[in-house]
Amino acid sequence: MVFPHASLLEQSARPGGTLAGLLLVATPALSVTQFDRSVIYLCAHASGEGAMGLVINRRLPRPGFEELLEQLDIEPSPPLRRLGLCAGGPVEEMRGFVLHSSDWKGEGSMQISEAATLTASLDVLNVMAKGGGPQDALLAMGHASWEAGQLEEEIFQHDAWLLAPFSREVVFGHDHTAKWRQALALINIDPIRLTSRPGHA
């Protein structure tokens, strides 16, 4: 069976192809792992060089945004804008990454696509605390990463992930519990019909 994400996979097979800017949507093959029903925004991917992404649907209850800014001595307090915090993945869990719309760039910003940019420096938090900065943003603590060939193996051989296109609602939306189903809907997959059977690639 050919799943709707087949054309997205073709992107990585082309010379210089990359999956960066796409969504990884966990399948039931990951149901007994920490990535159960995860949605990951891929920030970096290159054939032969591995991949890095942020889990965007795992709310991090503490610290709160205001508490985090106080720890970093960022004013004003309370901030004029607030950001929800996500548990971005099991790697470098104390390091923060701000994934945001590409209408703002600062020191250390890396544009991933026309729709999204990644910033790992404090200047974006300083600007947002004062009410400015990008229109859309989320703050992730930690990230997920794969060694060269590992992600491709998880997709092709272990049926662990489906690929979906970028969606502002999914990436920057506030309803984390709905994001997994919303991401599946982008590729016309009903989660009730999704099984752990192999052979979707």
Image (tube, helix red, strand yellow):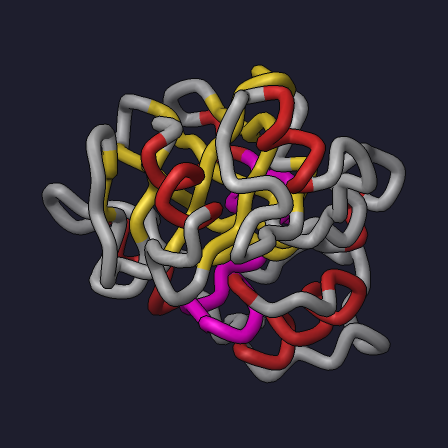
Counting labels gives 0
Q: Is 160 contained in the magenta span?
A: yes
Residue in view at x 33 percent, y 49 percent: 19
> Horizontally, is 169 left or right of 108 in the view?
right
Front-most of residues 187 and 14: 187
Residue 91 visible in the displayed image: no
Q: Quadrant of residue 30?
A: top right
Front-most of residues 145 and 172: 172
Q: Is 88 contained in the magenta span?
A: no
Q: Residue 133 at x, y = what percent?
A: 34, 54
Q: Residue 122 at x, y = what percent?
A: 39, 28
Where are the magenta residues, as a range? 154-171
Q: Quadrant of residue 160?
A: top right
> Horizontally, is 31 left or right of 176 in the view?
right
Residue in view at x 38 percent, y 21 percent: 148
Q: Residue 155 at x, y = what percent?
A: 54, 45
Front-most of residues 48 and 118: 118
Q: Residue 59 at x, y = what percent?
A: 75, 47
Quarter of the image containing the N terminus? Answer: bottom right
Front-most of residues 102 and 69: 69
Q: Can you say whether 5 is above or below 56 in the image?
A: below
Residue in view at x 35 percent, y 27 percent: 121
Residue 77 visible in the displayed image: yes
> Horizontally, is 52 left or right of 91 in the view?
left
Residue in view at x 81 percent, y 77 percent: 193
Q: Residue furthest left?
A: 15
Q: Can you say whether 71 is above or below 104 in the image?
A: above
Q: Can you say whether 172 is above or below 124 in the image?
A: below
